[in-house]
Image (tube, grey):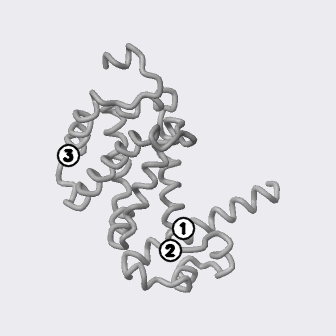
Amino acid sequence: MPIRKKSRSANQFTKQCIMEALLQLMHTQEYNDISITDITRRAGVSRMSYYRNYSSKDEILRDYMYQIIEEYVRELDTADIRSGFQTYDHILHSLKYLRKYKDYVLCLQKANRAEIVLHGLDMYMLTVTETTDKSFLEKSELYYYSGALYNIFMHWIRDGMAEETEAVAQVIYDHVKYNRYYRNPTAEHMKA
């Protein structure tokens, strides 16, 4: 294995240990009381390794959110996702996927860092629709949609997720089915 690849793998492993350590600590301590020493001790890494990878606890949480989003994108069939991310099946899939990370989201809520989830949803929307370099007005419809998903998901999780995932997906889909975002609207999309 080339040295660079080994180094990248070791660095990724170190980052993963740091992320897991912080999340474990968040279950037992108040976020503001968690120190870098607590994290490095729990992760089994040096302070130098910590600072080589992160400058703050918030950066660790954002990095973890980016990994969640990247994993989600890899799971999807990318051929139709750019125009079909507001279908019932995709909404259902996304809710089931987010549900897997409810403990992480609850930790973020407890630490008053839930906006990291919203930022991750924004990033996802802009990336799959290829609008990251567009103007604010061109992005605003996507921000509206990601904000709605965030709000619904956060209330659903706070309320204990008692409702079936399919029912929540249906509520969202019923709202967006006539107001879908399309980069290049066509007559075929208008019929859907």
Q: Nearer the viewer, residue 178 or 62?
A: 178
Distance Cα–Cα, label 1 vs label 3: 33 Å
Corner quadrant of residue 144: top left
Q: Residue furthest top?
A: 187
Distance Cα–Cα, label 2 vs label 3: 32 Å
Helix, strand or loop at label 3? It is loop
* Circle on res. 21: 2
Say which label, 1 or 2, has the lower sequence index.
2
Q: Do the numbered discs 1 and 2 sit on residues whose CB atoms are within 8 Å?
A: no
Q: Position of residue 55 (x, y in %)?
A: 60, 73
Look at mark 1 in the image and give the residue it sits on. Answer: 59
Quadrant occupied by the N terminus? bottom right
Query: Residue visible at 82% across and 55% down?
Result: 2
Q: Amino acid at mark 2?
A: Ala
Compared to 35, does 129 lie above or below? above
Query: Residue visible at 49% across and 42% down?
Result: 126
Q: Amino acid at mark 1?
A: Glu
Distance Cα–Cα, label 1 vs label 2: 14 Å
Q: Residues within 10 Å of mark 3 (few under 14, many from 20)?
A: few
* Circle on res. 130: none
Say which label, 1 or 3, has the lower sequence index.
1
Helix, strand or loop at label 1? It is helix
Quadrant occupied by the C terminus? top left
Compared to 31, does 116 lie above or below? above
Q: Position of residue 44 (x, y in %)?
A: 59, 79
Say which label, 2 or 3, has the lower sequence index.
2
Q: Amino acid at mark 3?
A: Glu
Q: Position of residue 24 (x, y in %)?
A: 43, 74
Query: Residue visible at 50% across and 38% down?
Result: 128
Look at mark 3 in the image and give the residue it sits on. Answer: 164
